[in-house]
Amino acid sequence: MKSRLRIFLDIAMTVLMPLLMAYSLVGETAHEIIGSVIFILFIVHHILNRKWYGAVCKGRYTPRRIFQTVLNTALFVFMILQPVSGILLSKHLYTFIPILPVTAALRSVHMIVPYWGYVLLSVHAGTHLLPLMSKMKKAPLPQVLFCADILISGYGVYAFIKRGFPGYMSGSTMFAFFNAGEPLVPFFLDYIAVMVLFASLGTLTAYLLHKFTKTR
């Protein structure tokens, strides 16, 4: 039951993240609702995986485990900063919270962390796809799936630049630019391609670190 719930939570967050990134394309109220739902799912996800925290100080740290621990820690920080800054800047759902004198700083934080969170969440998801990738070797069309992943990831590099991720993540772009007339489908396809790109990099990194550990 828990494993099914974990899968449901992971799929739900994966589907909702591109919607959250759409911001003005879905409307500010919808953006706040989606962000709140993701925050709740994030909390439940960590409650279900609380044993991971108890094992942090136990066992041997291999290169792969070090990578995943650093990744999980960074993702946790960004996934906390994102909703907290969003709640404090809320114009619709959380208006009962008083406006703070650090609003400008909060806006800067809320502009940067979603893009880092999106990338890190994609990498995190990719590291957990390694067992699935091992099973896919026995699939009837593994080469076709591999080629599709390469093509989508290649487009993901273009979409990563096109959608301004480098500027947002570095903090050099401090205002979100959206084409109000753009259909949602192209936007989502670009963000899905970016997600596939970094999930693939996460899977590849986990695989290489696993192989490195086995050869030592």
Image (spheres, rainbow, N blue to C red):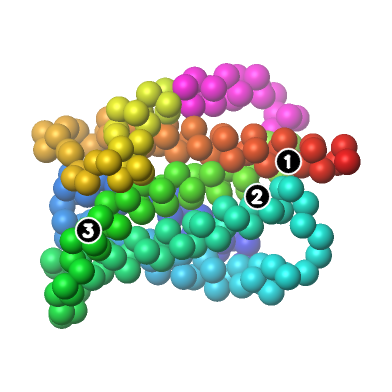
Of 141 and 56, which appears nearest the observer?
56
Q: Residue furthest right?
A: 216
Q: Is residue 81 magenta?
A: no
Amino acid type, residue under disc 3 in the picture: Arg
Label 1: state its secondary structure. Answer: helix
Q: Mark 2 packing: few (<14 Cα in 10 Å), some, or many (20+)?
A: some
Q: Going from the N terminus, do you reach mark 3 or mark 1 first? A: 3
Residue at label 2? 67
What residue is rendered at 59% in x and 25% in y? 145
Quadrant that contains the N terminus = bottom right
Q: Going from the N terminus, do you reach mark 1 or mark 2 first? A: 2
Indicate the position of residue 92 as horizontal and vertical percent values: 14, 67
Indicate the position of residue 207 as horizontal and vertical percent values: 71, 38
Q: Is residue 45 left or right of residue 96?
A: right
Count numbered badges in the picture.
Answer: 3
Cα separation between marks 3 and 1: 37 Å
Label 2: state its secondary structure. Answer: helix
Q: Is residue 138 left or right of residue 167?
A: right
Residue at label 3? 107
Q: Quadrant of residue 98?
A: bottom left
Label 3: state its secondary structure. Answer: helix
